[in-house]
Image (cartoon, rainbow, N blue to C red):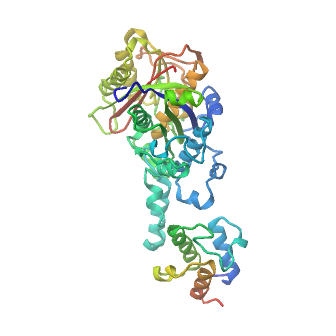
Amino acid sequence: MIEARDGRRVVITGLGVLAPCGSGAEAFWAGLSRPTEPAVQRRIDDFDPSEWGIKHVEARRLDRFAQLAVAAATQALTDAGMSLAEPGYDPARCGVVLGTGIGGAYAWESQTQVLLEKGPGRVSPLVVPTVMPNAGAASVSMRFGWRGPVETVTTACASGTHAVANGARLVAAGRCDAVLVGGSESCQTGVMTNGFQNMKALSTTGISRPFDVQRDGFCSAEAAAVLVLEEESAARARGATVYAEVAGSGSSADAHHITAPAPDGRGAIACMRAALADAGIDPAAVTHVNAHGTSTQLNDAAEAFAVREVFGSSRPAVTSIKGITGHALGAAGAIEAVALALSYHRRQLPPTMGVDTVDPAFDIDLVREPRDWVPGPAISNSFAFGGHNGSVVFLPA
Amino acid sequence: MSQPVTADTVRADAARHLGIGQEQLMPGVLLADDLGLDSLAGIELSMSLEDRYGINITDDELSEVSTYGDLERLVLAKTGAR
């Protein structure tokens, strides 16, 4: 990583994830290869904020995306064997970088209703801190006393990946000893859902089938994931479980259209190449791509082309977990980073579910069944509305 | 309002809003120091009671409130209850 000082390497030492297919690393991993009913909206049905120590009054000040962030961070710290009471490092060197695409959509929408029906005097004084997209990172910081850089990345569907990348840089550069990275999203309100619907982004069948010839749009999801990143030698010294190394990242923009990817995949190609160069990894050495693979016509075509262009005939194994998870927007890159960390740990690649027939136009090795894997260099992609692209390169550690 | 407003109904509504037991809302309990309500939570609680009883509590009036009993008296006075 270009920021790495004094040979510092960044490793993943804790995982937290809440997703419609399962919450907690074990249940999430099992859910990734369990067939699911068609559903254009995928929710975490069993989420109960009180189970995560979020009391009644606090729950009212945290929109659902922020509640999910707190829960995922709690899981990640517990998984890392770190205290929930105080960080094991100097708190001023402990950061939080979380992504979200939208923020507190439910409060925004319900308070608009209050304004229209009951008048200006009844609008909640808590609406601003509840709606703001940084509420997730802020509440995680406050709950656990992490007082270093605490920031929110909002690049739509690339937010989670950019958050992982930005947090890793803080550790590599020596600005932080530990950073909680990830993302959370929950915005299945009437306005947002119909907005997606009316722009024809959502699947009409409720089947998420990345790279399938019949793909017809994405299935929206809520989710949250948080990963603990630490400098490797300190992590090993405290006996932490090390899942994988975050070795480099790339970020680029299509500068093409507010929602459509550049059809030649130029932004995606530049992004993956930048990430590989940052990690010092030859494209031919990459054995796995955790794809953005949203199941939309345009994304999957541009991404398949870009993967072919970057990796050529080495044909790394490509998985999109969105066949199961649906598209969790700003949390997507975060839950996919957790899926990758678990792939290293389990030495297995999760399948791309929901697929009947891979689009014959795509020359990619799509993983259709759980596949045993000898851990090697891997890359995770996110491509977003706004033309934002993010890629992160992982290595076995 | 179909149901008469009494100290009991106010206490029940406040407890429900705060998600705590009614026994915690003794008249002398300090909203900030004992219940941990910050200024925003205090405003929120008073707004919830304003909404419930169709009354208006001004910022000046709210700034005089420090115990639960203060708030209860204010609400009962505004609703004309004894």
Q: Is residue A200 something one can see in this rendering?
A: no
- In front of the other: A2 or A29: A2
Q: Which quarter of the image is occupied by the C terminus of chain B?
A: bottom right
Q: Is residue A93 above or below residue B16?
A: above
| Count of numbered badges drawn on the protein | 0
Q: Is residue A230 something one can see in this rendering?
A: yes
Q: Is residue A333 above or below residue A66?
A: above
- Residue A142 screen position, x and y as percent: 51, 52
- Please indicate whether residue B56 sits to the left or right of residue B34 in the image: left
- Please indicate whether residue A255 sits to the left or right of residue B51 in the image: left
Q: Is residue A244 above or below residue A137?
A: above
- Residue A33 screen position, x and y as percent: 62, 25
Q: Is residue A74 above or below residue A105?
A: above
Residue A372, image quadrant: top right
Q: Residue at x 27, y 34 (%)?
A: A256
- In front of the other: A115 or A170: A170
- Please indicate whether residue A48 sits to the left or right of residue A332 in the image: right
Q: Which quarter of the image is occupied by the N terminus of chain B?
A: bottom right
Q: Residue at x 50, y 47 (%)?
A: A146
- Residue at far right of view: B23
- In front of the other: A20 or B75: B75
- Residue A259 screen position, x and y as percent: 34, 38
- Residue at far top of view: A313
- Residue A131 screen position, x and y as percent: 45, 56
